[in-house]
Image (cartoon, rainbow, N blue to C red):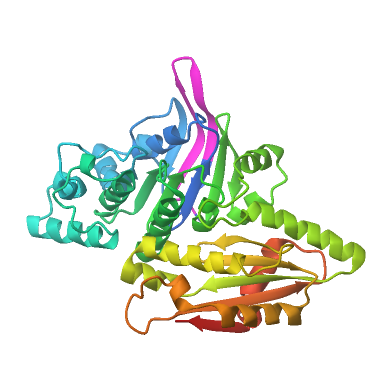
């Protein structure tokens, strides 16, 4: 059995007469992004502050690699603290420091880096997060979205093993929310840090998290994969997720994934009753990360939005489409067999124009690749299984290039 990197065991915490954590059990595994969801005031941020050591539990244990934090000596605690980084909900930037010095602060606090190395690290992170040209500006002189990116740069500048994110997208518009999520996911894959995030951005966090835990009335009432939480029968969890659902995806303007999953279940029932075929098509933008590297994460999200718009404008009135991941769009095609689904993809490929999707090319001659998987649904099965099958190599038998 894999040992958790961080583990809460029966943790209790109250402030005055107000209980916050009431027997919390939680496991966080190395190299994963774990997201904690729950109602406002449920204690999610309090849980994060226990990990970083800002708060100590009244009872229960918090373990790091199997060793209780309460049993660590001061040297071991300092060593652990150097492995942690924290991105606060309010960004917590210092108004008296310019942007460069805000990002450099964690490096200078450690006292083990030369000014040359500090300059190199800070400039590297600023470039990666599209923060060029604002070195000497102060937090009050930049936008809220830019402050978020500055806070993320500061969290990443020490190359930490563990990063705690407290509502990292609060106050951002949909495209910048998606940009921050894409940045977190991209850097987690690149650097391999363990991420622990508090968020209410559903379904967006399902696209970047390996595990999701729900905190309710001081206890973890669900812990599992994003697919498991979407399919759970627990009424508390289901009602919470549905309560956050909106008619339209804020980023693409499409219906949300939850709504399209409902459409899928309706079509399965229709197929079983009347033997009417339907198909699912899954589009994947294969080199979206290349656009991120060459032009920035914001440009990559713009490409996704433009592609989604082209798909949405070309489906029938009774079809349904939504995001199915950071770089995926799925379409439900009622009354459509496999051959017809393939014809739909071929027609779409012929109609797409690069300048309608790529507003600016990363470099001359750049093209992006869209792979397409599709499945005709012939029996009762979950949408998760169909999506996995559509994405598998043996079923991804269509590909087109847009320049």
Answer left or right for 70 relative to 269: left
Can you say whether 302 is above or below 246 in the image?
below
Q: Magenta stretch mostly in which secondary structure?
A: strand
Can you say whether 216 is above or below 232 in the image?
above
> Where the C terminus falls, by quadrant?
bottom left
Residue positioned 69% across, 52% down in the render:
231
Asked if residue 358 can be seen in this view, the reply is yes
In the image, 384 versus 330, the foreground residue is 330
Q: Is residue 24 magenta?
A: yes
Q: Residue furthest top?
A: 17
Place of residue 156 in the rendered image (x, y in percent of width and height, measured from the top left) = 29, 54
Residue positioned 20% across, 38% down in the render:
94
Place of residue 315 in the rendered image (x, y in percent of width and height, measured from the top left) = 66, 68
Answer left or right for 86 relative to 278: left
Answer left or right for 371 relative to 91: right
Which segment is the magenta one?
Answer: 3-25
């Amino acid at each position: 059995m894999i040992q958790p990197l961080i583990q809460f065991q029966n943790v209790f915490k109250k402030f005055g007469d107000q209980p916050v954590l009431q027997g919390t059990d939680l496991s966080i595994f190395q190299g994963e992004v774990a997201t904690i969801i729950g109602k406002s005031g449920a204690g999610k941020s309090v849980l994060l502050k226990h990990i970083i050591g800002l708060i100590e539990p009244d009872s229960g244990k918090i373990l790091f690699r199997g060793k209780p934090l309460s049993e660590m000596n001061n040297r071991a605690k300092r060593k652990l603290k150097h492995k942690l980084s924290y991105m606060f909900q309010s960004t917590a930037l210092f108004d008296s420091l310019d942007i460069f010095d805000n990002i450099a602060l964690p490096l200078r606090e450690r006292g083990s880096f030369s000014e040359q190395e500090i300059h190199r690290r800070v400039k590297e992170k600023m470039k990666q997060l599209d923060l060029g040209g604002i070195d000497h500006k102060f937090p009050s002189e930049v936008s809220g979205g830019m402050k978020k990116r500055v806070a993320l740069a500061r969290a990443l500048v020490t190359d930490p093993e563990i990063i705690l994110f407290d509502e990292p997208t609060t106050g951002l518009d949909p495209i910048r929310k998606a940009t921050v999520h894409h940045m977190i996911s991209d850097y987690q894959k690149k650097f391999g840090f363990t991420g622990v995030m508090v968020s209410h951005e559903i379904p967006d966090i399902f696209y970047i998290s390996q595990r999701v835990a729900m905190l309710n009335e001081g206890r973890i009432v669900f812990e599992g994969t994003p697919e498991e939480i979407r399919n759970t029968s627990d009424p508390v969890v289901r009602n919470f997720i549905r309560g956050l659902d909106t008619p339209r995806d804020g980023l693409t303007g499409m219906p949300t994934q939850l709504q399209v999953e409902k459409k899928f279940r309706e079509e399965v029932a229709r197929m079983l009753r009347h033997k009417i075929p339907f198909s699912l098509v899954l589009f994947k933008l294969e080199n979206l990360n290349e656009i991120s590297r060459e032009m920035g994460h914001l440009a990559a999200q713009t490409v996704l939005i433009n592609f989604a718009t082209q798909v949405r404008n070309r489906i029938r009135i009774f079809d349904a489409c939504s995001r199915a991941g950071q770089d995926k769009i799925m379409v439900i095609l009622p009354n459509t067999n496999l051959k017809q689904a393939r014809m739909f993809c071929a027609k779409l490929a012929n109609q797409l124009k690069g300048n309608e999707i790529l507003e600016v090319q990363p470099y001359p001659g750049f093209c992006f690749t869209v792979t397409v998987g599709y499945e005709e649904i012939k029996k009762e099965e979950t949408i998760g299984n169909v999506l996995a099958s559509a994405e598998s190599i043996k079923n991804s038998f269509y590909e087109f290039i847009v320049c």
